[in-house]
Amino acid sequence: MRMNMSEDGLITIPSGFLVKETIDRLESLAKSHGLTIFARVDHAGGAAQVGMPLRPTELLIFGNPKGGTPVMQDHQTAGLDLPLKALAWEDANGKVWLTHDDPAWIAKRHGLGEKSAAAIAAIEAGMTLLTKAATRS
């Protein structure tokens, strides 16, 4: 299930797994598809270190220069939104979600054109594949 792109350009899908397992699965899938993992951020762990509560929230930053470079060659400011990021988070009801930027929104935000259209389409297809696989049995 893909939620339609909203004005903020986020795609959020439900996960059938806990936050950590969702990010573990996404990381494993990304690596298996030859993507580089740049960072993993445990926001809830950081909050706990400063004595503040935060429901489970983890961010994975990943990508591939072959996919992202054509986008930045079209318009370098796209580097603000690349590499890709996905955030797994638990809501107040204990439901886990996976949220990421819509590649079409990234293209719109940075005024990307035909020069990077194929790269954006590939990124969109890849994100759909990875996020579905990471969140479903």
Image: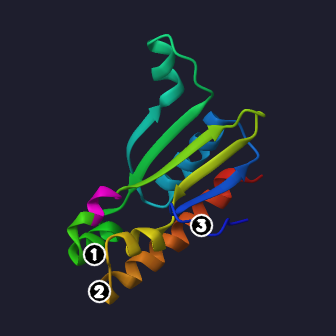
Kind of residue sitting beneath label 1: Pro
**Which span is picked out in magenta?**
78-82
Kind of residue sitting beneath label 2: Lys
Among the two numbered marks 2 and 3 on one chain, the one whose residue lies closer to the N terminus: 2
Residue 82 sits in quarter? bottom left
Mark 3 secondary-structure assignment? helix
What residue appears at the point 24 percent right and 78 percent down from the top-left corner?
74
Question: Along the horizontal axis of the image, is 45 left or right of 114?
Answer: right
* Mark 3, other Cα within 10 Å: few <14 / some 14–19 / many ≥20: some
Give the residue number, with chain letter if any, for mark 2. Answer: 115
- Nearest to the observer: residue 80 or residue 119: 80
Residue 37: x %, y % from top left: 40, 47
Give the residue number, with chain letter if any, for mark 1. Answer: 70
Distance from Cα at disc 3 to Cα at disc 1: 20 Å
- Tags 2 and 3 touching, CB below 8 Å: no
Among the two numbered marks 3 and 1 on one chain, the one whose residue lies closer to the N terminus: 1
Mark 1 secondary-structure assignment? helix
Q: Would you say residue 88 sits in the magenta stretch?
A: no
What residue appears at the point 52 percent right and 68 percent down from the top-left corner?
126
* Mark 2, other Cα within 10 Å: few <14 / some 14–19 / many ≥20: few
- Tags 1 and 2 touching, CB below 8 Å: yes
What residue appears at the point 64 percent right and 43 percent down from the top-left corner?
22
Residue 6: x %, y % from top left: 58, 65
Give the residue number, with chain letter if any, for mark 3. Answer: 128
Kind of residue sitting beneath label 3: Thr
